[in-house]
Amino acid sequence: MIAASGLRVEGRLRDVSLELPAGCLAAVLGPNGAGKSTLLQALAGLLPAEGEIRWRGEELRRIPFLDRARILAWVGQESHADFGFPVREVVAQGRYAHREAGHGEDGHGIEEALAAFDLTDLSDRPVTRLSGGERRRVFLARALATGAPIQLWDEPTSHLDVRHGLEVLELANGLKAQGATVLMSLHDLRAAHCFDRVLVLHKGACVAQGPPDEVLTPEVLLEVFGVKARLAQDLILELPR
Amino acid sequence: MSLRAVLLLVALLALALLASLALGEVHLAPGEILRVLAGGGDAMTRTILLDFRLPRALVAMAVGAALAASGVLMQSFFRNPLASPGLLGVSSGGALGAVIAFAFGWASLSMWSLPLASIAGAFLATLAVLAIAREGASTEHLLLAGVAMNALFGAATSFVLTLKAGHFEVGGQILFWLMGGLESRTWEHVAISLPGVLLACLLVLPSARALNLLAMGELGAQSLGVNVKRLRWELIILSTLLTALATAVGGVVGFVGLIVPHLLRLAFGPDHRRLLPLSMLGGAAFVLLCDLLVRTLPGQLRLGVVTALAGGPFFLWMLRRGGRP
């Protein structure tokens, strides 16, 4: 589990507190510029933020880099690549913090991570020769390969086609079932019902959090997103069983 | 695969070394060279080999290895395959130091004064880089600061050069130096460059894995356990040291840090665990061979001219391909 209180980043995040238990699938929602990416980066210790972030009662940012990398994995919104490392090598980077002295990465879970994101056939291809969505899956697979119990994903489903987007959600559900905490930012409010908890950010502050059906009221939708909710017959897309 | 690549480059380097020891105004047979290296041979051959060709070859190797390794580090640091060792102004700082030494006549005082003046100039440039980096500047900021410093040092160099334009001898020396060259390099130059280059190369190798992660993105690398802040400092310090040493003994030699890593990346992939040692070997071999051309071809060829003649067209071709292997 991970708990943060009074998280504050100058000009970007105002006093955000949250508590996510183990085995929890959570989403950060909010319009552009609301602070979703900032929150995820702050939780991952990737940018200076005031406040506390606790993991099992310990201040997360005081845990040394290598140990922290075994606890928490983060996937950014950017999935640009300048150098043509093969897909498998990039995914293997997820094991950086798991190397044994003199033996390189332990290689654990790499094939599984490749398979989980449908990358097995692409595993020898340079990442520079992938589409944006494929590259996004490579970075997600790298985070999965870490085996970290806390997964922070910044808009993992953007750039993905419908099927791979749904697969990401299903995979996150599987991680949750294994006791992981998965927190992802999201733009598609219609997917919110898949999550245990949602946090709604607006102008850097958390305006509501809780189960999606309690949080996403017509008032919140109008105030935060400037949209009116109307129940209608919708096209429901799911993975074939 | 990795071992084969290393063996290939070692063989290439050995051949280049043998060729540069054997060829010249006096051709020496491999047997003679071995005899001299074992402590025998006649006095004449010993002088040619031990006082002229061997120190020059060692300096060439140090310069090549340093520039190629420095290029790899800068490319990883800036996450751009087109970054070069001189990007932060270190080689133009070194050039300014040397030009001042020529202009004020220090260069003729001792064997050490010219390289030391160059190292002082490069050190000044490095201090400026570090001051900017210490304020937590982003990679883009550092890049722009490098552009500014290159312009600044370049202008100062031109200024000193125009002051000495009437003095043909000094002006000529300065121009020659700015085009890079390894003629009449001695064991003093070996002592200045080789130990530092070897040390920096050894220090950088353990970071190869972290460099792979850095090349895929700073934040991602940090989240996977790389101490990015420390790694960036290491990269700046070691790459400036390597460039400064190479400039001090070889003058301004362009394109080595660009084309050697790039060619090897094309051939053997971007993994720094392979790329770093291969670039050191390949850079050493490349400069040795270019210097061999300088020595054996007729006319007044300069080392920097030869490397640029080989590198310039390659650079343009790379740009046309988008610079992304």
Image (cartoon, coloured by chain):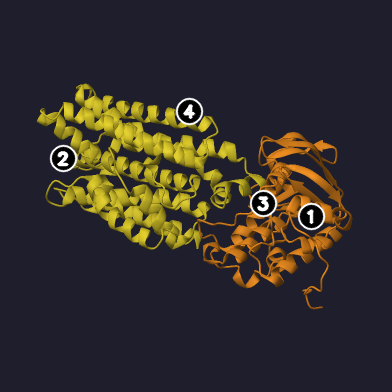
Q: Compare residues B27 and B171 and report the one nearer the observer.
A: B171
| Residue type at the position of mark 3 | Asn
| Residue type at the position of mark 4 | Ala
Image depth: mark 1 or mark 3 in front: 1
| Secondary structure found at label 2 | helix
- What separation in Å lies between label 4 and label 3 (alpha carbons)? 35 Å
| Secondary structure found at label 3 | loop
State whether residue B257 is above or below residue B164. Answer: below
Disc assigned to residue B44: 2
Q: Where is residue B240 in the image (x, y as percent from the top left)?
A: 42, 36
Marked residue chain, label 3? A
- What separation in Å lies between label 4 and label 2 (alpha carbons)? 52 Å
Please determine if labels 1 and 4 lie on a single subunit.
Answer: no
- Disc 2 crowd, CA 10 A, few/some/many (<14, 14-19, 20+): few
Apparent side of residue B204 relative to residue B186 in the rendered image (left or right): right
State whether residue A112 is above or below residue B9. Answer: below
**Where is mark 1, residue-wise?**
A221
Q: Chain A is drawn in which colour?
A: orange
**Where is mark 4, residue-wise?**
B131
